[in-house]
Image (cartoon, rainbow, N blue to C red):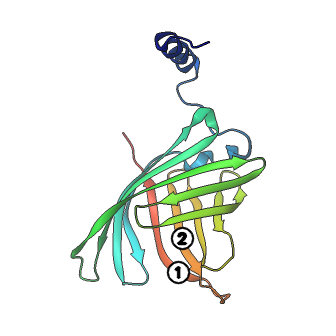
């Protein structure tokens, strides 16, 4: 038996409007609440090029606290400060049981972070799985309630030494 489309739509609307507007992170994600907010950076360093970056990031709790969604825009500059373009990024952070995972994409790259080391409300380091390609690591470290230090790098295949790709500081935007 098929329900009329109008009935299905109204049922979905009632369920959606009965949910909280935005719950904080739940379960295994609860220690990551320090990431939530609107952030701005103007001091990023790009190790490979010697250039810099600046940008914005919004991290929100989604799906009733079951996920965090990071949306970024980054502008890149060469060593002399000349614009070199920019790009948008998305990252979904979620728990699978007690393990935290994240999936990152920017239109050219996809990184599947398969584990995270969390110091609740202070730091998180996401790591991709070892394998044929590099192992990527992304770290957020709370320096103060309104400041996060970021480090992104990788361990190339067959090596053990961490290769820094980019660093920066983001500050909470105030309305």
Secondary element under disc 2, as helix, strand or loop, is strand
Q: Can residue 31 be seen in this view?
A: no
Q: In which quarter of the image is residue 113?
A: bottom right
Q: In which quarter of the image is residue 49?
A: bottom left
Label 1: few (<14), some (14–19) or many (≥20) C-alpha neighbours in 10 Å:
some
Tell me which residue sits at (50%, 51%) in the image: 146
Tell me which residue sits at (64%, 80%) in the image: 132
Label 2: few (<14), some (14–19) or many (≥20) C-alpha neighbours in 10 Å:
some
Tell me which residue sits at (30%, 65%) in the image: 86
The answer to whether the residue labelled 2 contacts the one labelled 1, judged by CB atoms less than 8 Å apart, is yes
Checking the image for residue 164, the label placed there is 1
Tell me which residue sits at (60%, 51%) in the image: 93
Residue toward you, 174 or 114? 114
> Left or right of 32: which side holds 78?
left
Query: Which residue is the site of mark 2?
Result: 151
Vertical order, 133 against 145 (above or below): below
Secondary element under disc 1, as helix, strand or loop, is strand
The spot of residue 120 in percent (x, y) is 71, 52
| Label 2 – label 1 distance at C-alpha | 8 Å
The spot of residue 56 in percent (x, y) is 37, 55
Q: Can residue 118 be seen in this view?
A: yes
The C terminus appears in which quarter of the rendering? Answer: top left
């Amino acid at each position: 038996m098929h329900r009329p489309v109008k009935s299905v739509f109204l049922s979905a609307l009632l369920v959606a409007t009965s949910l909280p507007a935005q719950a904080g992170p739940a379960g295994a994600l609860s220690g990551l609440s320090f990431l939530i907010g609107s952030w701005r950076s103007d001091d990023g360093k790009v190790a490979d090029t010697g250039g810099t970056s600046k940008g914005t990031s919004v991290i929100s709790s989604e799906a009733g606290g079951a996920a965090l969604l990071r949306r970024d825009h980054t502008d890149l500059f060469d060593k002399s400060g000349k614009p070199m373009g920019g790009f948008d990024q998305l990252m979904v952070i979620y728990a699978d049981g007690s393990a935290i995972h994240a999936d990152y994409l920017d239109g050219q790259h996809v990184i599947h972070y398969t584990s995270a080391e969390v110091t609740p409300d202070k730091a998180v380091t996401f790591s991709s799985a070892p394998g044929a390609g590099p192992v990527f690591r992304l770290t957020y470290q709370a320096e103060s309630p309104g400041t996060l230090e970021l480090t992104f790098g990788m361990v190339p295949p067959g090596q053990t030494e961490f290769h820094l790709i980019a660093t920066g500081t983001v500050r909470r935007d105030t309305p």
